[in-house]
Image: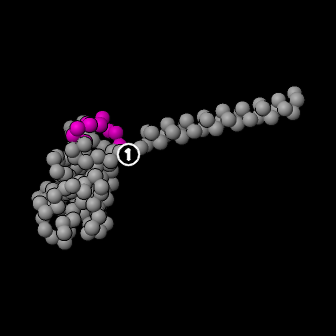
Amino acid sequence: MKPKHQRLAITLTALVALIGAALLAASALREEASYFYTPTTLAETKPPAGKAVRLGGMVQAGSVKRAADGLSVAFTVRDQKAEQKVVYKGITPDLFREGSGVVADGALRADGVFAAETLLAKHDENYVPRELKDIDMKAAEHSKDTLAE
């Protein structure tokens, strides 16, 4: 085989391998992608049970119920229009409180309850995710643990 044909064969093989690797990576990322939902968008889109999603909103006042085991907690996340029941088993973040912002990674169960695998609480008094910027913070409990000004 001539050197010119060898270079062409190597170039084509490398190109096919590169395209294959890119398609494989894109497929893996698509399966692992976690989309952000508010309770309203979660109710509207109804993702399939078991699909990894990220739910964000405010922890509704009076909704946090801790189990006797000390690790399980059930609460309601709300936005302006909707509410979503959430269950979580694990140690909650120090900043997790009623009336504060929370982002939960997990999946919707078949019974409509969101099963969280991780919880993230707000990181300072002024932070509000852009998806939640229109929530009436004055309606939340007025304390240092809310996003109300």
Residue 13 x/y as whole percent? 71, 33
Q: Which residue is mark 1?
A: 34
Which stretch did the figure color magenta?
42-52
Q: Residue at x 28, y 52 (%)?
A: 131
The answer to whether one can see residue 74 in this image is: no
Res 12 → quadrant:
top right
- Local SS, label 1: loop
Residue 15 shown in magenta? no
The residue at 13%/68% (across/down) is: 142
Q: Residue extending furthest right?
A: 2
Q: Tell me residue 106's x, y (percent).
A: 32, 47
* Placement of the C terminus among the 4 image quadrants: bottom left
Where does residue 35 sit, x and y in percent of width and height? Answer: 35, 45
Of the pair 94 and 78, the residue shown nearer to us: 78
Q: What residue appears at the point 31 percent right and 66 percent down from the top-left corner?
A: 123
Can you tell which quarter of the image residue 4 is in?
top right
Say whether residue 61 is left or right of residue 44. Answer: left
Outermost residue toward the bottom? 144
Task: Tell me the quarter of the image containing the N terminus.
Answer: top right
The count of marks equals 1
Label 1: few (<14), some (14–19) or many (≥20) C-alpha neighbours in 10 Å: some
The amino acid beneath tag 1 is Ser
Seen from this angle, which residue lies furthest top? 1
Relative to 72, residue 50 above or below: above
For the point 25% across and 57% down, which residue is it? 133
Residue 66 vs residue 142, the one in the foreground = 142
Residue 67 x/y as whole percent: 18, 56
Is residue 30 among what the camera can see? yes
Q: Which picture quadrant has residue 110? A: top left
* Horizontal relation, residue 61 to residue 39: left or right: left
